[in-house]
Image: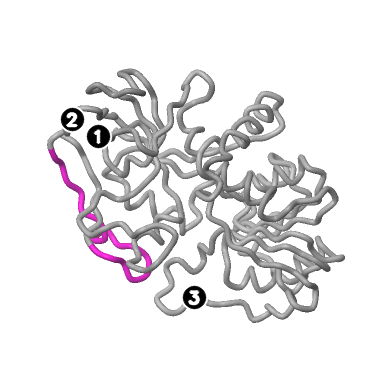
Amino acid sequence: MNKQVVLAERPDGLPKSSTWTFQETEIPEPKDGDVLIKQHYISLDPAMRGWMRDVKSYIPPVGIGDVMRAGTVGEIVKANNHPKFKVGDFLSGWGGVQQYTVTNGKGYFKIDPNKAPLPKFLSIIGMPGMTAYFGILKVAELKEGDIVIVSGAAGAVGSLVGQIAKLKGCRVVGIAGGKDKCYYLVNDLGFDAAIDYKNENIYSGLKKHCPDGIDVFFDNVGGDILDAALSKLRMHARIVICGAISQYNATSRPKGPSNYLSLLVNRGTMKGMVVFDYANQYPEAIEAYSKWLQEGKIKSKEAIYEGIENFHDTFLRLFSGEKLGKLILKVS
């Protein structure tokens, strides 16, 4: 049987266990030109919360009764005259939260498990890695010597953003929740400093570590932290809006920045990004990461939890902060 997690209702606030239904169905048979994939790992990302909303966005919402959308890696166990893939190939794609999926291969990419452990294809060589690479280098237009602030810095995207900025000769300060995460940023990843927003005043932390202001703010959090960063902009500063996890489960209108006039005074820019816009450039990022990994210049951490049955509790770790690095569900 094929274990699946299906969207049952559109959540108001933090998703409850009733948001999804756990079900078992027959393992599907691949039709002519299809392949059957046995999934090994499922990516859990903050963006999934947005995909449950029935609102206009960069991607259609997950339908009620549909398998929950998610990035996956898995192995082809059956192939029916597929022109490109064969049994034994490992693929990365959008298989959703289920054990098996059938696809014609559109949107799937062949990966080599001999080059990296499979979870890495959902973290540094997956969507978070692509987001970090293009977000900091292309959208932020990073320059050597920039003073860079990263919110959600201990997460899958933020941790890579900071490391890339350091490789490019910048001063990097991360914002994270808790002493352990801040220790990780400075002592393991090489950030210049870290601000613990749970135990430290953000404004005081920014004044201490960035007395001359900031050139780039890479935001994964939004809310009060975005507002604080706006107050410290230097001339021609760039803000990248990658995410706003502090607002995703809000039951009222999202909180907008009150310090936005700093953009006018400092001739700054604030730009949103969606990683899918850079899909045709992914090979550039993969080549760069491969080189950095071989040279030991960059690290990624994966927080892996097991069992589709545990999807709800594991998913909520995205919002509780009870994880470090990329959150992944191992299929069992």
Q: Are marks 3 and 2 in contact (CB under 8 Å)?
A: no
Q: Identify the residue position indicated by label 2 in the image.
A: 31
Q: CA distance from mark 2 to mark 1?
A: 9 Å
| Camera sees residue 220 | yes
Look at label 3 and name its amino acid: Pro
Q: Which mark is residue 102?
A: 1
Question: Does residue 15 show up magenta in the picture?
Answer: yes
Q: Identify the residue position indicated by label 3 in the image.
A: 254
Q: Residue at x 32, y 35 (%)?
A: 331
Among the two numbered marks 2 and 1 on one chain, the one whose residue lies closer to the N terminus: 2
Question: Does residue 325 show up magenta in the picture?
Answer: no
Look at label 1 and name its amino acid: Val
Total labels drawn: 3
Horizontal side of residue 202 vs 108, given as left or right: right
| Camera sees residue 78 | no
Horizontal side of residue 252 vs 219, given as left or right: left
Q: Which residue occupies the extreme left position in the image?
A: 26
The foreground one among 17 and 19 is 19
Q: Residue at x 78, y 42 (%)?
A: 168
Q: CA distance from mark 1 to mark 3?
A: 38 Å
Among the two numbered marks 1 and 3 on one chain, the one whose residue lies closer to the N terminus: 1
Secondary element at tag 3 = loop
Q: Residue at x 32, y 19 (%)?
A: 86
